[in-house]
Amino acid sequence: MSEKAVILLSGGIDSATTAAVAISRGFELSALMFQYGQKHGIEIQSATRLARFFGIGYYVVIEIPSGIFSSALTDEHRAVPKNRGINDHEIPDTYVPARNILFLSYALAFAESIGASRIFIGATAVDYSGYPDCRPEFFQAFQEMANRGTKAGVSGDNIIIETPLINMSKAEIIRTGIDLGVDYSLTHSCYDPDADGAACGLCDSCRIRKMGFQEAGTPDPTRYRI
Amino acid sequence: MSEKAVILLSGGIDSATTAAVAISRGFELSALMFQYGQKHGIEIQSATRLARFFGIGYYVVIEIPSGIFSSALTDEHRAVPKNRGINDHEIPDTYVPARNILFLSYALAFAESIGASRIFIGATAVDYSGYPDCRPEFFQAFQEMANRGTKAGVSGDNIIIETPLINMSKAEIIRTGIDLGVDYSLTHSCYDPDADGAACGLCDSCRIRKMGFQEAGTPDPTRYRI
């Protein structure tokens, strides 16, 4: 019987590629998706399509009240930054406080409850927006905390946090996914889409995505409004 | 202006006492409460009464789908253990996977969003059920993880996890609360209450509570059905 793992599916390129990597390594995946008042709540549709694409039978959509977050990604009165210098050393306005901490905590509870031995998360610290909760030192600290704070950890049966993309550029991620047969037309990246889902082309997430497809030498299947 | 802090209010003795301690130290509290399918969901009523008692104006009840947890505390088909040897070195069936990790992660997101500098949690590692996520080494690891995974932490402005009761016995906690004017008749402890809220008197939580009041030499205001 295959080993169970939990995957955090956002509907973007990174989590889709991570799912493909986990499946290629033989894991049986269960997925968590999060609705937290993000302006790109449409990503849940992509996440659901991806779950079907990958044959993930068990997935749960978790609702987090957006009122607990202060972020340009959730607050109607704050604009999503466009054409920002992505390599600025500043943490951008789209930072959502403790988001990956919360998502991984849910994954940990779920993994321990269903007897999964791993948690896969598609974080990358190369072509990214500079969020503190995407860096290797954060994941190491989360792992240590999980080992001490769960029954699994205390019993010496740690649930392992897997970040297979952490050191990959966006282009490498896309090439890896294409090799594994990922259909990127199912994914969504834009932080600020139209009501009908067209991508803005100017937010960090769109720009990193475009650059990745360019560098990978592969057409980007996204419908951009610009 | 007073410094802001977030408190996790469960409705029990420990979180009530912790709120009193935080207020006595001058913090302006905002509270989080959790509905996670616990059999003692009635504790939310106690938490709400306590919030009013302490004059906490801003509190949020977070709903967590019980389906992600496997625990005797949430599963209708598993009984809450009664008259268990409390000092057994075994983690009991009422352990809820990653519960404090999840609660603290919510508190961290909320604290960072509202500009609170502290998080108060009423964990104790003395008279307790042996949960791994109530031990000092867990809180140290959580603190380290929070420092690395949040904008506040990376900016050198760590949000501090405060566990003022961690080394107190239940009797000491009760004496502390009484000195600070806590009305324990508002609290609820039982894991397995009647529909009308009467406590079972036999679960770990009831037994630790009874023992605490006895040792503190103070009458327990709880209505027990046994």
Image: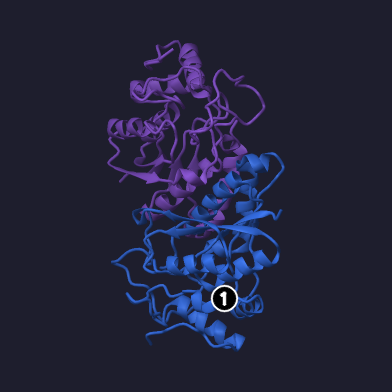
Chain colours: A blue, B purple
Name the secondary structure under disc 1.
Answer: loop
Q: Nearer the viewer, residue B126 or A46?
A: A46
Q: Is residue B143 visible?
A: no
Residue pointed to by mark 1: A127
Q: What residue sits 55% from the left and 43% below the top?
A: B98
Quarter of the image with the C terminus of chain B in it: top left
Q: Residue A11 appears at what percent x and percent y?
A: 49, 68
Q: Quadrant of residue A61?
A: bottom left
Q: Tell me which chain the residue with mark 1 is part of.
A: A
Q: What residue sits 59% from the left and 75% below the top?
A: A182
Can you say whether A170 is above or below B137 in the image?
A: below
Q: Residue A28 appears at what percent x and percent y?
A: 64, 58
> Which amino acid type is shown beneath numbered disc 1?
Asp
Q: Is residue B13 left or right of residue B142?
A: left
Can you say whether B84 is above or below B23 in the image?
A: above
Q: Is residue B25 visible?
A: yes
Q: Residue A70 appears at what percent x and percent y?
A: 37, 59
Can you say whether B98 is above or below B201 in the image?
A: below
Q: Nearer the viewer, residue A49 or A69?
A: A49
The image shows a total of numbered marks equal to 1
Q: Residue B2 appears at what percent x and percent y?
A: 33, 44
Q: Is residue B124 left or right of residue B49?
A: right
